[in-house]
Amino acid sequence: SIVYTNAWIVSRFRYVSTYIMVQQAFCFCAAAVAVKVFRLAEPVEMSWALYFGRVAPLGVCFTLYLWGSNSAYVYLQPGLIQMIKPIGSCFVFAHACYFGVEEYSRAKAMNFVFISAGTLLTAAPQLLRGVGGVEDASPIEVVFGV
């Protein structure tokens, strides 16, 4: 339901970057209330160097991912956007192999080839109708992989 709610909001409110700022502000406030008020988790002591070195880059990647996903709603149907998101796992696997977190194996790589081929085969008719949204969504899958 969140996907269709986002699509509905973006179709009526075309300022996607402002919408993303509202989403992230809400998430920040919800996390602050969960930690500070309800004590659902212990606060973490963190230096500014650690924050800007580890947390901020993830926030930037997530912001780019949200921006691209929400921008794609302007051009593509929500179902199609959800259908092409599994391709992001291919980028995650490639980056994990590159950085030595995951060990490359031919079987795993073929699994991702089949995931991508199946996704593209299923989504091809709609992809051909809405190329503009794919241009927004495709780089976002790369960012998701990072």
Image: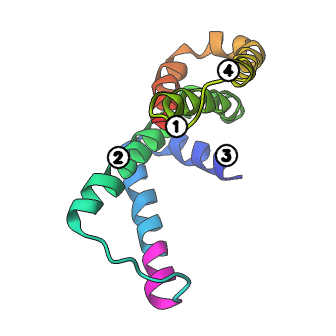
Question: What is the magenta segment's predominant secondary structure?
Answer: helix
Q: Which residues are magenta?
A: 31-38
* Mark 1 residue type: Ser
Q: CA distance from mark 4 to mark 3?
A: 32 Å
> Does label 1 or label 2 sit earlier along the sequence?
2
Rendering coords of residue 82 (x, y %): 68, 35
Residues packed near mark 3 inside 10 Å, few (<14), some (14 to 19) or many (20 plus) = few
Q: Nearer the viewer, mark 2 or mark 4?
A: 4
Q: CA distance from mark 2 to mark 3?
A: 24 Å
Q: CA distance from mark 4 to mark 1?
A: 25 Å
Residue 32 magenta-highlighted: yes
Residues packed near mark 1 inside 10 Å, few (<14), some (14 to 19) or many (20 plus) = many
* Mark 4 residue type: Ala
Residue ID for mark 3? 4
Residue ID for mark 4? 109
Query: Residue placed at 42% from the left, 59% from the top?
Result: 24
> Does label 4 or label 1 sit earlier along the sequence?
1
* Mark 3 residue type: Tyr
Q: Nearer the viewer, residue 133 or 88?
A: 88
Mark 2 vs 3: CB contact within 8 A: no
What colour scheme does the image use? rainbow
> Does label 2 or label 4 sit earlier along the sequence?
2
> Does label 4 or label 3 sit earlier along the sequence?
3
Q: Nearer the viewer, mark 1 or mark 2?
A: 2
Residue ID for mark 1? 69
In screen coordinates, is 69 left or right of 57?
A: right
Q: Nearer the viewer, mark 4 or mark 1?
A: 4
Residue ID for mark 2? 60
Query: Residue placed at 60% from the left, 45% from the top?
Result: 8
Element at badge 1?
Answer: helix
